[in-house]
Image (cartoon, rainbow, N blue to C red):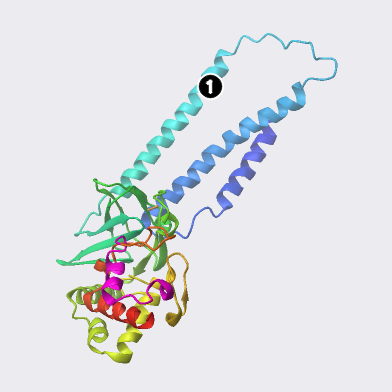
Amino acid sequence: MVAFGVIASVIGIAIGLAIDWFPVQGSTQGEKIDTFWDVLIICSVPFFVLVVTVVLFAVRDFRMRPGQENLDGPPIHGNTKLEVVWTAVPAMLLVGLCTYAYIVLDDIEKAPAKGPERVVKVTGEQFTWTFEYNEGGKKFKTAQLYVPNGESVKFDVGSKDVIHDFWVPAWRMKIDAVPGITTTYRITPKRLGNYPVVCAELCGLGHAFMRQTAHVLDKAAFDRWVQQQVQRTAGGGAAAGGAAGGGGQSASADAKALFTTGNSAGATACGGCHTLAEAGTTGAVGPNLDQVLKGKDEAFIRESIVDPKAEIAKGFPDAMPTNYGDALSGPELDALVKYLAEVSK
Ligand code: CUA
């Protein structure tokens, strides 16, 4: 039985460590969390094997055989030594693992030793995330998350309505967004690329659509992006200026890009949810704009973008985010409204 248990434990641990449990590891905090997971596998597999092995051998050797239906088992008065062992060993293991878990948690929550730290304010609402930056005194809001690689960033997480949960699986850390309080965690990204940002708390009809993207850029690209956002927010950006003042072909081309793929802050991309023949989009989460915007004026279209709760199309969920007024610059919003009014006539 011991030989069987040892072999099964070794195989179980090998399988446990070989399985690719998690998405790609994108933060320094993730290293410690993944190691902790491996330690848990190594410690728990032998206990699982012990219990299953004893049950299997007991079934084989002590099962009831024909003719034994009315026999009683031997009288057992317990075994003090055995009881002490099976209480003490799991207790020591639990205390040990709790201590290790506490050390890991304390370590991954610690502020970086030197330098000022970037703080990004994360606000959840039904059904979107908004990210608020303060880069050298310049404040702006975006609908997609951008962070520079290798620099610690602290997230101050809050909610406008119900409980959400801010989670980037590649970074491993995750925390509830609770109305009325600010929760925090910090991560140091260590891998360039784009990773899903998801909501991990059932928050209503649009919960499954509460997905955005975290972009990890190198420092130079991040600085350029910040520059772009500062200009966009000030309304003086080349792109925004072009959309507003260019008129004609270029304005409608830019507005169409806003509609299909969004601006540099990652806002809109309306086509992901809405059908619009002119833009070639086929989203079905929200109403078909060719139908609901027919005959509507620019004021109605503007209100529908900035304050989507004002009038909700019959048969559709109240799922459109309310942060587009913040995420679009004035000229971008003007261009988008003009475009939608023209193509839905
Ligand atoms: Cu927000 Cu689920």
Residue 276 location (% of width, % of height):
43, 76
Indicate left or right for 111 with 77 as reference.
left
Q: Is residue 326 magenta?
A: no
Residue 106 location (% of width, % of height):
31, 44
Indicate left or right for 309 with 291 as reference.
left
Q: Residue at x 43, y 80 (%)?
A: 279
Q: Is residue 294 magenta?
A: yes
In this picture, is 339 found above or below 317?
below
Residue at image mark 1: 85
- Choose between 42 and 294: the one closer to the eye: 294
Q: Amino acid at mark 1?
A: Val
- Choose between 211 and 186: the one closer to the eye: 211
Indicate left or right for 228 with 95 as reference.
left
Q: Residue at x 35, y 74 (%)?
A: 262
Residue sitting farthest toward the right:
67
Q: Quadrant of residue 247?
A: bottom left
Region rendered in magenta: 289-310
Residue 287 location (% of width, % of height):
43, 67
